[in-house]
Amino acid sequence: MALLEINDLHAGVEDKQILNGFNLTINAGEVHAIMGPNGSGKSTLSYVLAGRDGYETQNGAVQFDGQALLDMTPEDRAIAGLFLAFQYPLEIPGVTNMTFLRTSLNAVRRGRGEAEMDAAGFLRMVREKARAMGMDDDMLKRPLNVGFSGGEKKRNEVLQMAVLEPRLAILDETDSGLDIDALQTVADGVNALRGEDRGMLVITHYQRLLDFIKPDFVHVMVQGRIVRSGGPELALELEGSGYGAYLDAGADLQGDAHATSEGVPHA
Amino acid sequence: MSEAKAGIDRDTVEQVANFGGENYKYGFTTEIDADKAPNGLNTDIIRFISAKKEEPQWLLDWRLDAFERWKTMQEPDWAHVDYPKIDYQDLCYYAAPKSMEDGPKSLDEVDPELLRTYEKLGIPLQEQEVLAGVRKVAVDAVFDSVSVGTTFRDELAKVGVIFCSFSEAVKEHPELVRKYLGSVVPQSDNYFAALNSAVFSDGSFVYIPPGVRCPMELSTYFRINEANTGQFERTLVIADRDSYVSYLEGCTAPMRDENQLHAAVVELVALEDAEIKYSTVQNWYPGDADGIGGIYNFVTKRGDCREARARISWTQVETGSAVTWKYPSCILRGDDTVGEFYSIAISNNLQQVDSGTKMLHLGRNTSSKIISKGISAGRSSNAYRGQVNVHPKAANARNFTQCDSLLIGDKCAAHTVPYIEARNISAVLEHEATTSKISDDQMFYCRQRGLDPEEAVALIVNGFCRDVLQNLPMEFAVEAQKLVGISLEGSVG
Ligand SMILES: Nc1ncnc2c1ncn2[C@@H]1O[C@H](COP(=O)(O)OP(=O)(O)O)[C@@H](O)[C@H]1O
Ligand SMILES: [Mg+2]
């Protein structure tokens, strides 16, 4: 059974339809990259999958680990193991990073019927993971994302992911705004989580990230659907040619670019 | 955090969770034969109360004097609250559990039913129940009109600290009571204070001798149990020269359909170099979701930094009551005195809060700080009313006021009413105010991390209140944090 299976998804916000027949299958152990120009609907896809209020599905279905994902509350999706690293992480004044992490982990564990983690064990675990992300204790004591630089916010998203150990991680432009060192750290964090049981969906605008996180599959998204899928070489190709060719294609592309990991259609 | 305490907290949360829609954990009543005065307010009732307590003539006269003044006064109507007219002749002004009639000589003689009530509230009245490892907290428990017992008195007596019920203080330390009673809140200060002065029943008394740092937290728990009974307690805390005390006050009441009146007076006196920290977690029954029942909390709290370098700090977490009318204040009389007010006021459903503080700068180089966090949810109304007053002789007065409001939903209201009066040009007064809402994006972010909407609101609100929560003694801070979450249940979704 696939970890995530998106079938013919049509969804949007208010009256605007943004996803137009989106198809994608991710199996456990696979890393997929979605690339596409600004405004192609990449963040919308991540929000629809995570269950943000205000997004309507007109058509299509999403199965996550055998469950009908779109029927679940956002927190139940998180408990089921879906994690979204936000393109724009939110600030919560007065709530320390540490408190947020603990509240989150305990909520997820409780939701799974697991015992909450004891305070000492939690502290040790978080400190270790934070260090791996190049974050010092001071950053754990600061209010969540308040006054964090762009890079610090992104690292912090990856730290949360490392603590929650999700089944499926969606990273929405986690690379944007990062210098090369930060990019390396973030990529190391992501790579450390790659594993047999885990799927990843890496959304990016630039090919650069994929030098650090080697995807198994690359998809090009234009105007709310995947217009081409391939292996890592597709990313390199895009670096050379840009999205130009696809922008035109996207407009009149009514075809059946159904991307699956079993059989990647070659255009 | 000790395990024992954490255990209590977990119970708290579970009990609340198991309450089947009703969020108020303390809503049980206790079946106890009560000794009640007939309803109504007149000099006979006042004489009855005074006689019950075997008071000296001067105190009876003081009460009767207060009553005469009260009769000439009008109930205040300037607050941003709205409630049906109270019939003061239809209230009971004295109720005591019957078994107290002969006066228990020690906690061992206290009615076991009463002890169980306090156990349910999580307040250990047996000293041995205060487990090793937990910081000691001496407790005075007030049930309806009387104090049912004070713990750790012997240990406190060793260092000269007096901590007892107000009634006992009248008998055993009349000179202190007579000297300080009404010296901060005079009988005719306001309508409710005058009423309290006439009919006050019991409360706590604290005296810290010169140079003594009180070795443990002192704490009073108030509980209204009898139906249709007002609670009029009187608390007097005196910190003599160069002494320190931290005092905690907690309050609960059963769920009842009728409203109940609580009109307390708290007076604090800090002499030279003394410091008093006074913390309140007010969790009176707030009424149900439709605004039926609940406590009217009309309280006068004032501290007097009477001599040089005295400090008084009020910290309050107000989550309960149907209507709250409360302005803990500081008179900065001595030179170089400091007054502080840290407040969290939460209103949900149809609760109404009008609360704030007064800082009265009289001495030179006095400074005050006000941090107010108002949270409104449901259809509630929440007003901060603050006054900073600098007397012409108060050279170099300083005040910093930070007043933040957080709105949850769009049917509630927040008001900020700051009055500033500076009659000395050297005064430096700063005022900052913000109003914010919990954003949908913040909610989504928290829910994406596994928190349900109520947990998310509780987390965000606790963050909003952090500056104030940090000022509470540790034992209270954890309880208060839970309370913040509980009192906002049902405010989202
Ligand atoms: N809340 C919204 N209301 C209306 N249009 C929106 C909203 N969010 C996104 N869009 C539009 O949907 C399209 C896709 O946006 P988005 O998913 O953010 O793209 P990407 O992440 O690929 O840059 C854009 O045209 C954007 O303007
Ligand atoms: Mg985007």
Image: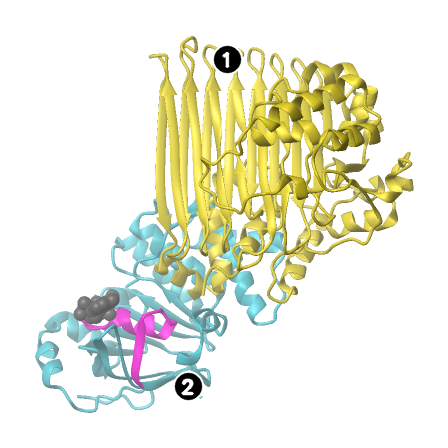
x and y percent of residue A230 in the render?
Answer: 24, 82
| Magenta-drawn segment | A35-59
Judged left or right of residue B481, residue B146 is right
For this rendering, which residue is in front, A15 or A169?
Answer: A15
Q: Quadrant of residue A58?
A: bottom left
Between B452 and A197, the one lying in front of the other is B452
Name the tint of chain B in the rendering. yellow
Residue labelled 1 has its Cβ within 8 Å of some atom of ligand 1: no
Which residue bears the numbered disc 2? A2
Identify the residue position indicated by label 1 in the image: B336
Which SS class for mark 1?
A: loop
Establish whether ligand 1 lies closer than 8 Å to the Cβ of label 2.
no
Identify whether A244 is placed above or below B178. below
Which amino acid type is marked by label 1? Asp
Q: Colour of chain A?
A: cyan
Q: CA distance from mark 1 to mark 2?
A: 71 Å
Question: What residue is rendered at 51% in x and 10% in y?
Answer: B335
